[in-house]
Amino acid sequence: MPEIRLEHVTKRWGKFYAVDDLSMVIQDNAFVTLLGPSGCGKTTTLRMIAGLETPTSGRITIGDKVVFDSALGINIPASKRKVGFLFQNYALWPNMTVYDNIAFGLSNLKEPMPKVDFEAKNAARLAEILKKPDDVVKVLEECRDKNGKLDEKKAHLKLIDAFTISLFTAKKLFAYHVESGKDLSGEITALQAKAEGARKSAQAGGGELNENFELVENGQVVTEVRKMTKEEIDLTVRRVSRIVKIGMFMDRYPAELSGGQQQRVAIARTLAPEPSVLFMDEPLSNLDAKLRLEMRYELQRLHLETGSTFVYVTHDQMEAMTLATQICLIDNGVLQQYDAPLTVYHQPSNLFVADFVGNPSINFVEARGSQQADGAIALTLFQNRRAEFYPARPLELTNWFQARDQEVQAQAAEHQKRAEDKNYVEKGNKDEVFRYHIAKVVEEDDSLQEEPVLSNQDLVLGIRPEFLEITSDGGLDGEIYGAMPTGMESTIKVRVDDFLLTGVVFGSTLFSLGSKVRLDISSSNIMLFDRQSGRCITQGSLRFL
């Protein structure tokens, strides 16, 4: 499967930037989720790769083929990019059966395909099957009704699945009445002779037929621009229906199917042309919670079985975390982080990423601090409580702040350089440092407060709920403010001074509101953020004094 490369891809309408200078590489056979809040640019990115939206500028490569380049004027249409697109609303034809919905796109496909002797191929396949009559009889015996009569329709379907053949070939096979026990040696000989005659005819013309009965000349498979035959279409439809497990619904109409079944039909239709890349735009959003969970497993299995590259748009972080090999997290059209799911969770690049990924949400705690001679960072947090933060890796805060300032200056210089270009358009939807939420007993109206003057001493701690531990010797005292047991675990709110911390406690412990507890924050993955830039400085552990 091909690698997908985006280089400085931008899409804007006027001064609104839907996608802003996006560069990323999607590895072959990856399952990438485009994640972010509504309106962040996920679907626009997907549509630009698929060819359904034209970028304002940039370059897009699928495999070794450049499909878009603004500088060179290249823009290959969607139909030529060998990609599949699965829409949110399934887009099934209500007046067509499941079979016809899947086959519709195939019947209109016309492109270079191998030149195949289908009659010889089917004859050889039938001869091969008839040589093992016991296998055929075994299948047919499963298709008798309570009166012992063979159900022809059921037999056709069983033969299709048992021998991976088309409906047309299954009908021919059934017509031999293998179950009668008659001698079929003459028919087998005739079928073999037909296949062998085709091979000799090809040789007389200067070519040969390979194992798939494709015409080969000078070591190369001969191609011709043609439509798929009914045989090929049927084989393809049956193949994808087996993959998504809808073979029993072929004669039904979409209205007769459940939401999950309709989704499977839509997936089968998308897979039928064998796209090298499969794009999905929130395909599970219309399903209920149980069906969504089931379909996640199905999509995982499909990705493994098809070997295709999947690019999946969602705003549901649970889908992104469970399905993806890589998460591309976008906000305001800008790439925030592109990493493996657990890396995004445990090592977020900034406050936005840390807040967006995780359920329940991360605890943000504002602090002021400075680094000590031993490398630890002395902090003051909550209402003048003191603690020490120990970085997991050696850290020199002064050097980190210097590097930050240099990067900010370089970005400003680059922005000034771009602004001098006559074609440059100033971004209307400005990028700002993410305004994180501090949970308090009495919420404050941020709109009535002036923006604080920040220094390098202003920091933010990011504490995942599972890092909160209730223990008798904890270094922090608190009060149970709320508790929501779910059976396997409880989500609790703990009041510390006037602040609220969210924790997850595993087990069936019952908590009484108002009860006093001791807390510990037991993890080496507590995040330390720079409040000015919102960037993650490092991870480490915390000890209250």
Image (cartoon, rainbow, N blue to C red):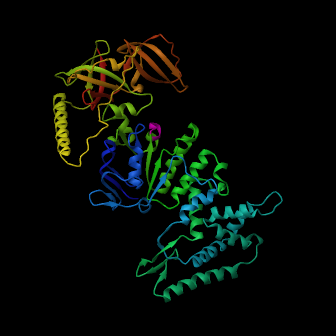
Residue 270 visible in the current orientation: yes
**Most extreme residue toward the bottom, as rendered?**
204
Residue 210: image x %, image y %?
Answer: 49, 77
**Most extreme residue toward the right, as rendered?**
147
Residue 33 visible in the current orientation: no
Report the quarter where the N terminus lies. bottom left
Residue 354: image x %, image y %?
Answer: 36, 32
Quick check: 401 above or below 15?
above
Quarter assignment of residue 446: top left
Quarter assignment of residue 15: top left
Quick check: 354 above or below 81?
above
User: Nearest the camera: 36 or 191?
Assistant: 36
Left or right of residue 100: residue 138 = right
Asked if residue 28 is among those painted magenta in the image, a careful observer would answer no
Report the quarter where the C terminus lies. top left
> Which residue lies at the image location 42% right of the left edge and 46% below the top edge?
43
User: Nearest the camera: 24 or 220?
Assistant: 24
Q: Which residues are magenta?
A: 315-319
Quick check: 445 above or below 227?
above
User: Nearest the camera: 53 or 170?
Assistant: 53
Residue 379: image x %, image y %?
Answer: 25, 18
User: Nearest the camera: 454 or 482?
Assistant: 454
Q: Magenta segment, principal secondary structure? A: helix
> Which residue lies at the image location 46% right of the left edge and 59% below the top edge?
275
Quarter assignment of residue 98: bottom right
Q: How many marks?
A: 0
Residue 211: image x %, image y %?
Answer: 51, 75
